[in-house]
């Protein structure tokens, strides 16, 4: 820590009720979940993110929520968490206070990820692999969370509420859809602003499109194997921030461009659906970096193998599987969905590997927490919900086990596990409904 950059901040107990960092006009309340931590430290950074100005212990714990209130702390402040607790990977715990952690509820990132060895909780190259412990500070190599201005995310958005009967859905990648579009200004190509430019909106309306489904736009991290080859994860299925729009698609409007994009789509009579990835996070398997969830409470956020808690259940094929049956992980997902509807105006969601979201300890459960939470939520009751009805975990894939309000994608022959599900349905005589996006039967 740079001693010359220290500041003197006071902290009061604050409130546990709203997770994340929330400015109330006078100061900022911080609240973060960790069931197994022994202490959570709030770290405040300089405006450029280069200097850690102060570490403050969150003074109160209510249940599993650590919280504190900092008077006078304003929007734009950069922060992160360091969390103390046992480092015993064989028991599922990977706490390492040397690693700066993103707030799972942050709406904005400052900075970018690098694949520096210090971002790993263990010593890369050690014969003990992830059973070793790394004491280097990761802060210079990871983004910082940002205290958001509540005026940037007012909870006043309206959805279009169009029915399914005339739905014509157009799947699009924010960057790819406009990057080479000759009628879109070069300064807007590949951005939220460009996707909702008059030229692209005219293209969609000419086609008769009623709904645009965007490939993942929640903040992501490119995998280390890609970064080592100077590549990035283009498609976006490696989320690390479930409340933050992906910054690489920012245009002249910055983060405000996302809500403005949705508003322009709505004025053109077009809905916006997000392809969302709540089945796993961008931290990877037991050899992945410690960036957020792993360092906050690995044993709670992730599903771990029974009897071998050093390792992760990998029903997603991506190295880890979020533990959606845990009440605070489920709460994070539900809070995230409501945020994108209420603050951003999103009209619906397509759940990537939806079966993983519905797995309890005993397997897929139609009456599990995720589907029941969706069914009763008043904010989400009126939006479109689409399930990708498979994962790579054990058990039979059932296309008809989602609630009637949640439609399922028809598997495409030749496309991995969905094709197997399609063939299984043919053999058993299950009804899959009409082609395209169809109602679960």
Image (tube, rainbow, N blue to C red):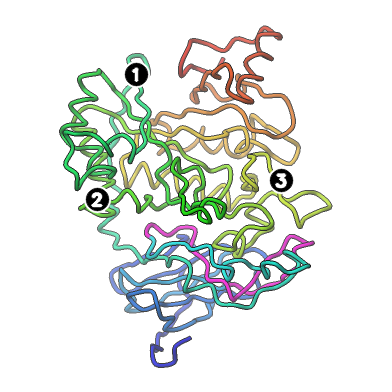
Farthest residue to the bottom: give it: 4
**Residue 231 at what x, y percent from top left?**
46, 50
From the top left corner, tell me how far across and down residue 192 is, in percent: 27, 44
Q: How many marks?
A: 3
Q: Nearer the viewer, mark 1 or mark 2?
A: 2
The residue at 29%/51% (across/down) is 250
**Residue 285 against residue 139 in the figure, above or below:** above
Magenta stretch: helix, strand or loop mostly: loop
Alpha carbon distance from label 3 to label 2: 38 Å
Viewer-nearest of labels 3 and 1?
Answer: 3
Which label's residue is closer to the chain start, 3 or 1? Answer: 1
Is residue 84 inside the magenta stretch? yes
- Segment tinted magenta in the rendering: 83-108
Q: Is residue 118 left or right of residue 180?
A: right
Which badge, 1 or 2, comes first in the chain's sequence?
1
Q: Which residue is mark 1?
A: 167
Q: Which mark is residue 251?
A: 2
Q: Residues within 10 Å of mark 1 (few under 14, many from 20)?
A: some
Residue designated by label 3: 313
Considering the numbered disc 1 on the image, is that residue within a helix, a strand or a loop? loop
Magenta residue check for 124: no
Q: Which residue is painted at 64% across and 25% down in the image?
A: 417
């Amino acid at each position: 820590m740079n001693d010359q950059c220290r500041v003197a901040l006071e902290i009061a107990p604050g409130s546990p009720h709203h997770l994340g960092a929330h400015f109330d006009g006078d100061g900022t309340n911080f609240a973060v979940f960790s069931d197994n931590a022994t202490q959570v430290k709030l770290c405040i950074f300089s405006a450029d993110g280069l200097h850690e100005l102060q570490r403050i212990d969150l003074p109160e714990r209510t249940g599993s929520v650590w919280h504190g209130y900092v008077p006078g702390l304003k929007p734009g402040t950069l922060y992160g968490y360091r969390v103390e607790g046992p480092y015993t990977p064989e028991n599922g715990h990977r706490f390492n206070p040397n690693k700066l952690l993103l707030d799972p509820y942050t709406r904005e990132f400052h900075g970018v990820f690098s694949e520096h060895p210090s971002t790993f909780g263990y010593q890369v190259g050690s014969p003990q692999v992830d059973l070793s412990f790394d004491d280097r500070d990761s802060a210079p190599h990871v983004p910082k969370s940002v205290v958001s201005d509540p005026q940037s995310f007012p909870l006043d958005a309206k959805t279009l509420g169009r029915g399914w009967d005339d739905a014509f859905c157009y799947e699009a990648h924010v960057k790819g859809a406009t990057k080479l579009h000759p009628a879109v200004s070069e300064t807007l190509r590949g951005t939220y602003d460009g996707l909702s430019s008059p030229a692209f909106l005219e293209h969609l309306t000419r086609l008769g499109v009623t709904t645009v489904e965007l490939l993942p736009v929640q903040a992501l991290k490119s995998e280390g194997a890609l970064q080592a080859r100077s590549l990035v994860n283009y498609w976006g299925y490696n989320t690390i921030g479930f409340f933050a729009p992906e910054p690489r698609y920012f245009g002249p409007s910055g983060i405000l461009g996302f809500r403005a994009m949705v508003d322009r789509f709505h004025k053109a009579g077009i809905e916006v659906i997000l392809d969302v990835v709540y089945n796993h996070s961008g931290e990877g398997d037991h050899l992945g970096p410690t960036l957020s969830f792993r360092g906050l409470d690995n044993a709670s956020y992730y599903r771990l193998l029974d009897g071998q808690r050093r390792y992760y259940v990998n029903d997603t094929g991506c190295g880890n599987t979020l533990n959606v049956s845990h009440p605070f992980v489920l709460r994070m997902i539900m809070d995230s969905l409501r945020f994108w509807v209420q603050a951003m105006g999103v009209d619906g969601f397509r759940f990537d590997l939806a079966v993983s979201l519905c797995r309890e300890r005993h397997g897929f459960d139609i009456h599990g927490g995720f589907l029941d939470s969706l069914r009763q939520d008043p904010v989400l009751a009126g939006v479109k919900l689409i399930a990708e009805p498979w994962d790579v975990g054990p058990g039979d894939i059932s296309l008809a086990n989602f609630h009637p309000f949640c439609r399922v994608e028809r598997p495409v022959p030749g496309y991995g596990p969905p094709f197997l599900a399609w063939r299984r349905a043919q053999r058993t005589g299950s009804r899959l409904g009409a082609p395209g996006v169809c109602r679960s039967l």
